[in-house]
Image (cartoon, rainbow, N blue to C red):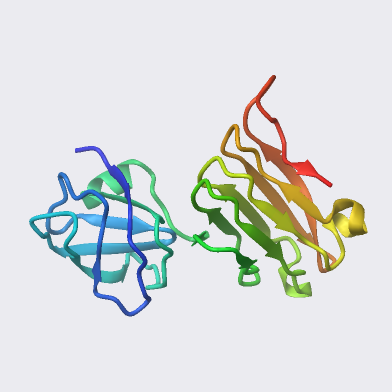
Amino acid sequence: MALTRTTAAAIAATDIEVTLVSIAGLQVSNNIAIDAEVMRVLSVPTAATLPVGVLRGTRGTLASAHAVGAQATFGPASDFSAAGHRQGRDVISYAAAGVIANPVPGTDRIAVILGTTALAMTLASPSKDNDGDLLMVVSGGKGAHTLTYTTTGLGGGGAATDLMTFSTVAQMSVIFLAFNEVWILVGGASGAGAVAAAPVIT
């Protein structure tokens, strides 16, 4: 059986039930992966509008809060292994404007900006302990999201490199490396030719 992808309603770190947009094919004992957390299904409702009973923080992951619209993937535990699904990288979804939290020192973080409505996001400078950590920011929808880093500008470039705007033509991602308490742009990707191939930096 293949893994199924859907989205979830907002989830608090202490919730023992989650609501998914679709539960077609969901079964008791399936795994659900949302951001960097894996849950085991304990009960399946009769409709997707009702919550699914879950055991939080399984497979060595931690129970954490998840934003409305966060991607949820479910299926048998064996299919997760076969698909190479693994944890160990921090994933956080954002459904509202605000600050993208820095990774815990010694780890990498994927920050997913959800939706197509433009969200204004900001970066804070990494600490010395973050040297070598990666921060990957992904637009989960084709939105003109902005990413502002006014502390020093990307790579310490000041006002000339302190704003990035994501494309409305294609979903995009950018990767930053923490070094010397500054975020340095490693790269941006998505599309070619007429499709914006990299974020606009102004």
The quadrant where residue 51 appears = bottom left
Q: Give the x, y percent position of residue 48.
A: 18, 54
In the image, farthest residue toward the left: 46
In the image, farthest residue toward the front: 117
Q: Give the x, y percent position of residue 28.
A: 12, 58
On screen, residue 161 versus residue 137, left or right, reads right
Rendered-image quadrant of the N terminus: top left
202 or 42, which is in the foreground?
202
In the image, farthest residue toward the bottom: 14
Residue drawn at the location 25% of the way across and 62% of the way down: 19
Residue 115's place in the image compared with 15, above or below, is above
196 or 28, which is in the foreground?
196
Q: Give the x, y percent position of residue 160.
A: 91, 52
On screen, residue 81 versus residue 144, left or right, reads left
Residue drawn at the location 69% of the way across and 30% of the way down: 196
On screen, residue 185 versus residue 26, left or right, reads right
Residue drawn at the location 19% of the way across and 50% of the way down: 23
Q: Give the x, y percent position of residue 34.
A: 37, 58
Q: How many marks?
A: 0
164 or 104, which is in the foreground?
164
